[in-house]
Image: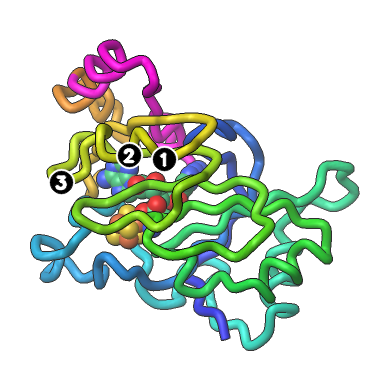
Amino acid sequence: MYSVKEIFYTLQGEGAHTGRPAIFCRFSGCNLWSGLEKHRASAICNFCDTDFRGTDGPGGGRFDTTEQLVETLLSYWPEGLEAPPFVVCTGGEPLLQLDQSLVDAMHERGIEIALETNGTLVPPKGIAWICVSPKGKADVVINECDELKLVYPQQDAMPERFAHIRAQYYYLTPVADPHSNSNTHLYRDAVTAETIAYCLAHPQWRLNLQSHKVINIA
Ligand SMILES: C[S@@+](CC[C@H](N)C(=O)[O-])C[C@H]1O[C@@H](n2cnc3c(N)ncnc32)[C@H](O)[C@@H]1O
Ligand SMILES: Nc1nc2[nH]cc(C(=O)O)c2c(=O)[nH]1
Ligand code: SF4
Ligand SMILES: [Mg+2]
């Protein structure tokens, strides 16, 4: 059984695939925060901008079988396209639920899979694009990925700690106000200036913006 908070079709807003049409599958639950505000301050990850509790979002629900979830995901892809369906698995922490049988079932239906993970759990085999976003003191168990996308600045998780992880791209995302979506001042603040300064001094790292918030889409 898979618990999914929401499913939606939009543009990938972050990382190397920014601007690419994608179906987002937001799995419920996370291993680094309960999702309750009363637990935020004491959580390992305490700046999360996402509601991942429960299954009550648009397209969310409980799916008893891999087939049910895969067919539901495919229903979000426009018909008659040559491009293979592109599904971004996120959450919450998707690796609490995304297992080899679901990955295999998605591949059987021609889906290209991307993953957004906090890096604390080992992914199933064969995922086309893995984005690792380490959090606080949490140990990262993935030593190779496609993009490393670190929220900056973070106490206990500064870029130096992760520069050895093999990746095609290394991104820093200025930490956004967790309670505010789509705000134009978001990227004109001190945190952004600090992130830019770090990239300029350490050119292994590039600036990543949450572009979906800038243009106010899901
Ligand atoms: C909500 S998380 C879900 C996937 C996974 N649990 C993770 O942390 O990577 C999706 C992305 O949003 C980023 N994110 C979460 N809160 C943020 C914030 N306040 N500002 C900037 N990025 C944030 C995460 O670092 C991650 O790259
Ligand atoms: N457009 C859009 N792009 C995203 N990239 C990563 C997201 C996430 O919350 O995992 C996300 C999201 O929520 N929306
Ligand atoms: S950003 Fe990711 S790891 Fe942190 S609480 Fe949100 S879903 Fe969990
Ligand atoms: Mg998001």
> Was residue 209 drawn as part of the magenta stretch in this picture?
yes
Residue range (magenta): 194-218
Residue 23 position within the rendered picture, expressed as x and y whole percent measured from the top left: 63, 53
Q: Amino acid at mark 3?
A: Asp
Q: Label 2: few (<14), some or many (≥20) within 10 Å?
A: some
The residue closer to the viewer here, 64 or 145, is 145
On the picture, is 24 further left or further right than 102?
A: left
- Within the magenta stretch, is there residue 163? no
Which image quarter: residue 148? Answer: top left
The quarter of the image holding the N terminus is bottom right
As measured in the structure, the alpha-carbon distance from the residue carrying label 1 to the one carrying label 2 is 6 Å
Q: Label 1 neighbourhood size at 10 Å, few (<14), some (14-19), many (20+)?
A: some
Residue located 19% across and 35% down the image: 153
Real-space Cα separation, disc 3 to disc 1, in angstroms: 16 Å
The residue nearer to you, when weighing 170 against 27, is 170
Identify the coloring. Answer: rainbow
Q: Which residue lies at the image location 56% right of the left edge and 70% below the top edge?
A: 98
Task: Please say whether residue 131 is visible from this viewpoint.
Answer: yes
In-image side of 109 versus 134 (left or right):
right
Q: Which residue is mark 1?
A: 165
For the residue with label 2, is its CB less than 8 Å from the closest atom of ligand 1?
no
Residue 199 place in picture, x, y as percent: 30, 18
Q: Secondary structure at mark 1?
A: loop
211 shown above or below 6: above
Determine contact: label 1, label 2, CB under 8 Å: yes
Which residue type does callout 2 highlight? Answer: Phe
Disc ID at residue 156: 3
Reading the image, the residue beneath label 2 is: 162
Q: Residue at x 27, y 17 (%)?
A: 196
Label 3, residues with CA under 10 Å away: few <14, some 14-19, many ≥20:
few
Dot 3 or dot 2, earlier in sequence:
3
Disc 2 on helix, strand or loop?
loop
